[in-house]
Image (tube, rainbow, N blue to C red):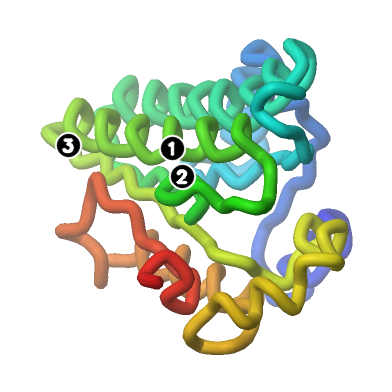
Amino acid sequence: EGAATADEIRQRGRQALTLSVDVADSAQVDRMLVDVVEALGRLDIAVNNAGILLDHSAAGCTDDVWRKIMATNLDGVFWCARAAGRHFLERHQPGVIINTASMSGHVADEPWSHLAYSVSKAGVIMMTRYLAAEWGEHGIRVNSISPGNIETKMIQTQSDHRQQWIEATPLRRLGRPEEIGGVAVFLASDAASYVTGHDLVVDGAYTCV
């Protein structure tokens, strides 16, 4: 999938690089940034989008499940944001960092049981605010996006809940991936040049009711 996207980018006359990285490993993340800069020359925008979801009750959440989710969803986002931030700071270069959070970082999605996922995403939202405050004077903008129920592979694994999600969403449908992509493009663009430290919820008003 990543290779196909890279090919499409190259066909449009642009450069593209695909790398396989475990974002839970900070050394791999740091190496990734080196490889990206060597191949493409510089970094301007970082979108931290890796995440996993494992169902569990609060009482039934094992140590392994908790650590696995936090390692990818929270640690991984920080390792990537830190690597990007260091790159911008060392070069006295402005930049943009966009972290993928979730509406689950705002509400308890009962009856769906994913405590660790929600906690990890709430952490991403706070991390985003903190980094925006610390790095703002250097021209580095940091924002997050909190998607609602979007038509992705992650949602497809939860197909038993699909109709419930639709009925609980005022727009009465699930979101489309391109509706998240459009928000990311906005946050990365000069149209959002005064937007930082913000979590933009894209959920069809799911969290409003």
> Mark 1 or mark 3, which is nearer the start of the sequence?
1
Tell me how far mark 3 sits from mark 1, CA to CA.
Answer: 21 Å
Labelled pair 3, 2 in contact (Cβ < 8 Å): no
> Mark 1 or mark 2, which is nearer the start of the sequence?
2
Helix, strand or loop at disc 3? helix
Res 189 quadrant in image: bottom left
Q: Which residue is mark 2?
A: 105
**Between 50 and 207, which is closer to the camera in this rendering?**
207
Of badges 3 and 2, the one in the foreground is: 2
Counting from the top left corner in percent of width and height, residue 44 is at: 42, 46
Helix, strand or loop at disc 2? helix
Q: Is residue 38 visible?
A: no
Tell me how far mark 3 sits from mark 2, CA to CA.
Answer: 23 Å
Q: In the picture shown, does residue 92 fall above or below 153?
A: above
Q: How many marks?
A: 3
Res 176 quadrant in image: bottom right
Image quadrant containing the C terminus: bottom left
Q: Which residue is mark 3?
A: 136
Q: Residues within 10 Å of mark 3 (few under 14, many from 20)?
A: some
Q: Residues within 10 Å of mark 2 (few under 14, many from 20)?
A: many
Q: Which residue is mark 1?
A: 122
Labelled pair 2, 1 in contact (Cβ < 8 Å): yes
**Between 90 and 120, which is closer to the camera in this rendering?**
120
Image quadrant containing the N terminus: bottom right
Counting from the top left corner in percent of width and height, residue 38 is at: 63, 31
